[in-house]
Image: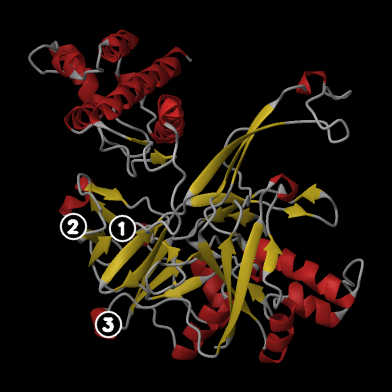
Amino acid sequence: MPAILVTIKALQPILATSFQGDPNSDVSYDYIPGSMIRGAVIGRYLQHQELGELDLTDLETQKLFFQPNHTRYLNAHLVSQKERHRTLPVPRSWYKLKDAEITENAGTNIYDLSLEQDDQQESLKVIRDGFCVFEDGFVRLYTPERRINIHNSRDRRKGRSSKREDQPSSEGAIFRYDALDTRQTFQSVILCEERNIEFFKQLLSQPDLWLGGSRSAGYGHTQIFCKIQDSWHEFQALGDKEDIDAEHLTITLLSDTLLRDVNGQPTANPSLIAAAINTACGSDLPMPESKHIFSSQTYIGGFNRKWGLPLPQVPALAAGTVVVFENAPLTEEQMQQLHWQGIGDRRNEGFGRVAINWHRRAILQVKKPPKPQASHQQPSISSPSLPLAQRMATQLLRQKLDQLLKTELDRRKLEARNISNSQLSRLQLIARRGLSSEPASLQDVSEFLNRDNLTKTALEQFQKTRFKQTNEPFYSWLQDRLKNPRSWIAQPPEVQLSTEVKATVDDSLATEYTLKLIMAVAKQAAKENQQ
């Protein structure tokens, strides 16, 4: 299948705004959406044709930009460091042992529960990295680097912060951008009819391209390079054909997917994947069993520049969702059609990409990518400024840990009816005591939770209380945190301002934020009890 590979090098941070974060911040996706690539191509097209706007009644214009059966603009994902392959979303069926640490040197086992499930499933933890690629016999896990910048709102005419007549409290308002960092390379793919390949190649011949929001504030400048590939495949099979039964069909979503129920309403029901595939290629897949579904949902929106209005926010199946069908073969022609066209709505914007029988091994070896060597020498900081620079680096690191703590807290909501507020208050008080010591210590909390020091009633309350999302006992979770304070920090962040100034998560900082997490979980449960 011919395709146009568009390699994008970020010269400035890229702000592809998603629905994450609070009202005073914009958080970018981990990738560049296909709709953004399409918008940039439309801009080039209008400039090339010297048009003010698109003629939506023109059949050729519809085929180029709006009809998914003719042209599709796939999301731009990170490119791997070694072989420069476009990475793909990590399947939701991949798990690792709770205490297993994935490094760049030694391979770590991960288990694909879509192929094999056993009694040790409770001791496994889902893989949190965003993207992966298969290289040198290993799966490499990638997560895009991000940059957080703080901005002040200002009046465009006055060039400084000023009150707006319709918003008296707007003066000095602060907001935050969490964007994709510079010096990263992404790759998008344009799937089109063969007769249009030269047309797109001509449109994308100029290397400088601006993507995303806040371009006037120093965001969005990229450099692009195009390549025509006659035989293109979106994924490389992880395993051999002999590794999987011909009747065993594994569907993995390579992008967010928009499906509709029988009433035409958008829904994130993974069971509808079977109906979508049957509609797309004329197959007869049955409904999948619940134990063969590994899914997550997200919300999709967008912005229509023609109207100047946001698009409706609708639920969608998240990239990486896996559904397994048994005794449901597809012909080679049907598979090729699904790989080429995809399923669901808005396929022309990169939604609905699918892979069939992509991962074929129940156990895989994974590594982190090697740390890239700096291509330029970092600036040196003068000796008098080193203490201030180190404080700045430590503060930036704490901001990242605060965000990690907030994310973890959202996943750690207790079924608080089994534990009294007095026990939760005691836990908070003792954790605060450990936090106030110098350095922070987990000793007081460890002694408090010792089975010999708790009454029978208190111990039963801690053991019976479980987390809503994972059903993990509160007591065992606390013991895990005390034994390994770093375990909940999946990817310890670090901040490096220069060769001399660097801030990393040490044992003291991990202990401090573990105590803060324990206090936050207990406080959240106590509030729920009161309500």
Question: Which residue, as the protein is rendered here, is positioned at the far left?
Answer: 452
Q: Which residue is mark 2?
A: 118
Task: Report x, y in % for residue 96.
Answer: 24, 53
Q: CA distance from mark 1 to mark 3?
A: 23 Å
Q: Which residue is mark 3?
A: 240
Q: Along the horizontal axis of the image, is 17 left or right of 309? A: left
Q: Give me the residue at 44% from left, 48% from top.
A: 378
- Say what secondary structure mark 2 lies in: loop
Q: Along the horizontal axis of the image, is 55 left or right of 248? A: right
Task: Report x, y in % for residue 428.
Answer: 32, 13
What amino acid type is highlighted by mark number 3? Asp
- Say what secondary structure mark 3 lies in: loop
Mark 2 crowdedness (10 Å alpha carbons): few <14, some 14-19, many ≥20: few
Q: CA distance from mark 3 to mark 2?
A: 23 Å
Q: Nearer the viewer, residue 106 or 74?
A: 106
Q: Give me the residue at 57% from left, 37% from top.
A: 21
Residue 221 found in image quarter: bottom right
Q: Which residue is mark 1?
A: 368
Q: Along the horizontal axis of the image, is 83 left or right of 531? A: left
The residue mark sitting in front, 3 or 2, is 3
Q: Nearer the viewer, residue 124 or 414?
A: 124
Decide which of tag 1 and tag 3 comes sooner along the chain. Answer: 3
Q: CA distance from mark 1 to mark 2?
A: 26 Å
Residue 67 found in image quarter: bottom right
Residue 475 found in image quarter: top left
Mark 1 crowdedness (10 Å alpha carbons): few <14, some 14-19, many ≥20: many
What amino acid type is highlighted by mark number 1? Lys
What amino acid type is highlighted by mark number 2? Asp
Task: Report x, y in % for residue 526.
Answer: 39, 15
- Say what secondary structure mark 1 lies in: loop
Q: Give me the residue at 38% from left, 43% from top.
A: 499
